């Protein structure tokens, strides 16, 4: 059985269980338990504090884990990123009081819960600072005179805004990642099965199924906008001279492509979410 460590409670807990569920792996919620066994997949799940997950994976207490890349880099343990998971997105940024006009950090004091990542960044940039390590409420330190700047995670930016701070540099972009240590062949085979499902879920989340009607003389242009998985499917409509086109569009460029399809003469465009997508 493959042992997976996920966050017991916090920002990554729900997203971790959700992706497992979408992979068809039934898990009862771990709020009151430390360990559950999946009902229909050879997977045992440990619910832990996120800070401990990289070490447990390194030491082989768990085979794989889901953590923020920020935590993995800060803990600096031997565990490799197998795949990004597309949730828990945030950035690690340096911020200073809004009223400050001097953005230079040289010789200043920076409060953070990420001393390792921050010192790596400062070294690379050749800036010398005093790092004040603090485990929480980093954002209040400039106001109480404990630090000039902070280095903390940001997602919407509202915490910085509330505390009258402004971001001056982003030192890391992070999201939830699946990590693994060295695995024996049998465990690697289970991980490969899990990974196959995760990739299908990720692909599905990043794509939409599109159906549209088009006059036959516009098909070439429309199909050029829709590469699909291989190429679009074209079916004749009952109305002569018209076809129905089916394809897949990536989430990234979604609205642009839709606008271009309309311009190219597409009508009755339907967009449908994809449940799973296997390449
Ligand atoms: O109890 P445990 O140790 O397991 O959890 P934790 O309290 O250490 O972590 P938790 O649950 O807060 O975060 C888990 C992971 O979620 C982090 O390691 C990141 O990878 C990811 N994540 C994504 C975030 C955020 N977004 C986030 N916004 N983690 C923290 N924040 C905090 C940030 O520190 C700041 O206080 O939210 C505030 C900023 O948010 P905005 O929206 O105001 O910018
Ligand atoms: Zn933590």
Image (cartoon, helix red, strand yellow):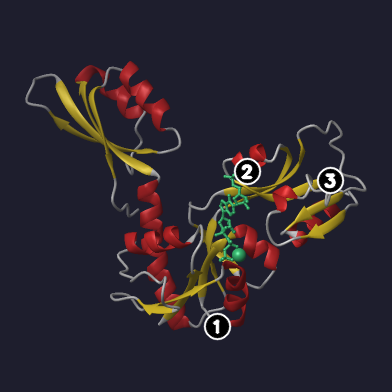
Nearest the camera: 145 or 57?
145
At which x and y percent is residue 170? 70, 44
For the residue labelled by badge 2, is the local secondary structure a helix, a strand or a loop?
helix
Q: Which residue is mark 2?
A: 159
Q: Is mark 2 within 8 Å of ligand 1?
A: yes
Q: Quadrant of the N terminus?
A: bottom left
Q: Which residue is mark 3?
A: 148
User: Does residue 232 show up?
Assistant: no
- The first of marks 3 and 2 along the sequence is 3
Q: Are marks 1 and 3 in contact (CB under 8 Å)?
A: no
Q: Residues within 10 Å of mark 2 (few under 14, many from 20)?
A: some
State the residue at coordinates (48%, 56%): 85
The alpha-carbon separation of the residues under discs 2 and 1 comes to 36 Å
Q: Is residue 15 left or right of residue 125?
A: left
In the image, which disc is placed on residue 61? 1
State the residue at coordinates (38%, 78%): 36
Q: Residues within 10 Å of mark 1 (few under 14, many from 20)?
A: some
- The first of marks 2 and 1 along the sequence is 1
């Amino acid at each position: 059985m493959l042992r997976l460590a996920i966050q017991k409670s916090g920002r990554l807990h729900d997203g971790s269980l959700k992706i497992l569920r979408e992979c068809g792996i039934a898990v009862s919620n771990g709020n009151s338990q430390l360990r559950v066994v999946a009902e229909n997949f050879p997977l045992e799940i440990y619910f832990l504090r996120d800070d401990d997950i990289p070490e447990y994976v390194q030491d082989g207490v768990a085979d794989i884990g889901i953590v923020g890349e920020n935590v993995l880099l800060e803990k600096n343990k031997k565990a490799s990123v197998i795949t990004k998971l597309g949730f828990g997105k945030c950035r690690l940024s340096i911020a200073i009081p809004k009223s400050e006009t001097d953005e230079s950090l040289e010789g200043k004091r920076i409060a953070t819960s990420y001393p390792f990542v921050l010192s790596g960044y400062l070294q690379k940039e050749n800036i010398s600072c005093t790092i004040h390590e603090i485990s929480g409420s980093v954002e209040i330190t400039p106001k109480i005179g404990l630090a000039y700047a902070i280095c903390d995670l940001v997602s919407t930016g509202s915490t910085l805004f509330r505390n009258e701070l402004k971001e001056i540099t982003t030192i890391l972009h992070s999201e939830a990642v699946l990590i693994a240590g060295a695995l024996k062949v049998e465990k690697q085979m289970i991980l490969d099965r899990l990974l196959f499902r995760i990739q299908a879920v990720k692909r599905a989340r990043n794509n939409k199924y599109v159906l549209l009607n088009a006059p036959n003389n516009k098909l070439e242009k429309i199909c050029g906008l829709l590469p699909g998985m291989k190429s679009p499917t074209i079916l004749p409509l009952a109305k002569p001279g018209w076809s129905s086109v089916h394809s897949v569009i990536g989430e990234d460029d979604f609205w642009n492509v839709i606008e271009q399809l309309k311009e190219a003469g597409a009508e009755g465009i339907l967009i449908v979410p994809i449940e799973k997508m296997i390449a």
